[in-house]
Amino acid sequence: MRGSEGNPFDLHDAEAYLRWRERKLASCARSPADLLVEVADPMQLTAAERGALLERCARTNMAVYVSPARAGANSDVPRRIGEQLGLRTLDVNYLADDDGVTPLAVAGSGTRSGYIPYTDRAIRWHTDGYYNPPQRKIRAMILHCVQRAESGGENRLLDHELAYIALRDADPQHIRALMLADAMTIPSRSEEGEVARGDQSGPVFSVDDGRLHMRYTARTRSIAWKDDEAVRAASAALQRMLDADPHVLTLRQEPGMGIVCNNVLHDRAAFSDSPQHRRLVLRARYHERIDALPA
């Protein structure tokens, strides 16, 4: 993104931004069909399948593979997909299984039942790992569908680079505000009277090795925005944009499908399970990006 063409994320470099913007808007996905890649065996991608997934991620920051459904929950599938796309370092986060993959399903009891991803309720717009410290930044993730719900559970997806464009076009000061080092703070989390994670402050938009990174949640609880007029205006503008951007894509995953992405903006609709269809999605988060063909 840098070099002779300039830096499109520098608010003082309008020419570089306009060139990048033109390319980005010309190549963005117009429908979920633009993201789909048929995969015969996710455990052993062909060169063409892998290339198609990487091409879509390079162009739109996300892709969706469609593979034959497999019986049972098998975390080997998302981990093997990640390996083939050059992802090596899983984020072994709180509530993940020992192998770093998190089964997202309704939990009727236990620790997980107190957290919204393990309920059938809607989840608002966010990027994953927004509460992580900078050294554990989530740059990519995989959501592999083992079983769908009886109804609902759709994901809306939006390339975070398109969100950046919409906000910058509306008012570059929104970008300036959301790039402040303390724009958004996630308060500490305690367990049994002990601090399990301290306050985590950081920007919403940042430039990470020349690429745009976004850290965001639309939730209103357990979040503190900087007490600053420009930040409040930018946050409100972003929330309005997310509900109206024409580039938002809606996808309902079926068994065997998986979303691979550079931690794009996404949400989840509320859903209802049945004895035949109990929603189960395996989530793998990574510290690397999906960028180029691995060696």
Image: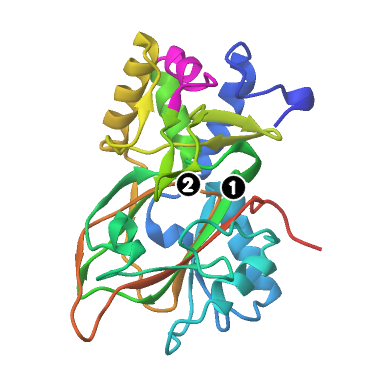
Residue sitting nearer the eye, 178 or 248: 178
The residue singled out by tag 1 in the image is: 139
Expressed as whole percent of the image width and height from the top left, the position of residue 219 reads: 30, 39
Q: Which residues are magenta?
A: 171-184
**Mark 2 → mark 1, Cα distance in angstroms:** 9 Å
Q: Is residue 138 magenta?
A: no
Q: Is residue 181 magenta?
A: yes
The label number, if any, that marks residue 114 in the structure image: none
Residue 22: quadrant of the picture: top right
Expressed as whole percent of the image width and height from the top left, the position of residue 96 reads: 49, 64
Expressed as whole percent of the image width and height from the top left, the position of residue 179 reads: 52, 21
Give the class, few, some or many, for how many residues have Cα within 10 Å of label 2's Cα (few <14, many ≥20). many
Residue sitting nearer the eye, 37 or 187: 187
Relative to 31, say whether 212 is above or below.
above
Relative to 127, say whether 172 is above or below.
above
SS at badge 1:
loop
Identify the image quadrant of the N terminus: top right
Expressed as whole percent of the image width and height from the top left, the position of residue 82 reads: 62, 66
Q: Is residue 82 left or right of residue 86?
A: left
In this picture the colour scheme is rainbow
Residue 108: quadrant of the picture: bottom left
- Mark 2–mark 1 contact, CB under 8 Å? no
Identify the image quadrant of the C terminus: bottom right
Relative to 243, say whether 71 is above or below.
below
The residue singled out by tag 2 in the image is: 264
Going from N to C along the chain, the mark reached first, 2 or 1, is: 1
Badge nearest the viewer, 2 or 1: 1
Give the class, few, some or many, for how many residues have Cα within 10 Å of label 1's Cα (few <14, many ≥20). many
SS at badge 2:
loop
- Residue at image coords 73%, 27%: 2
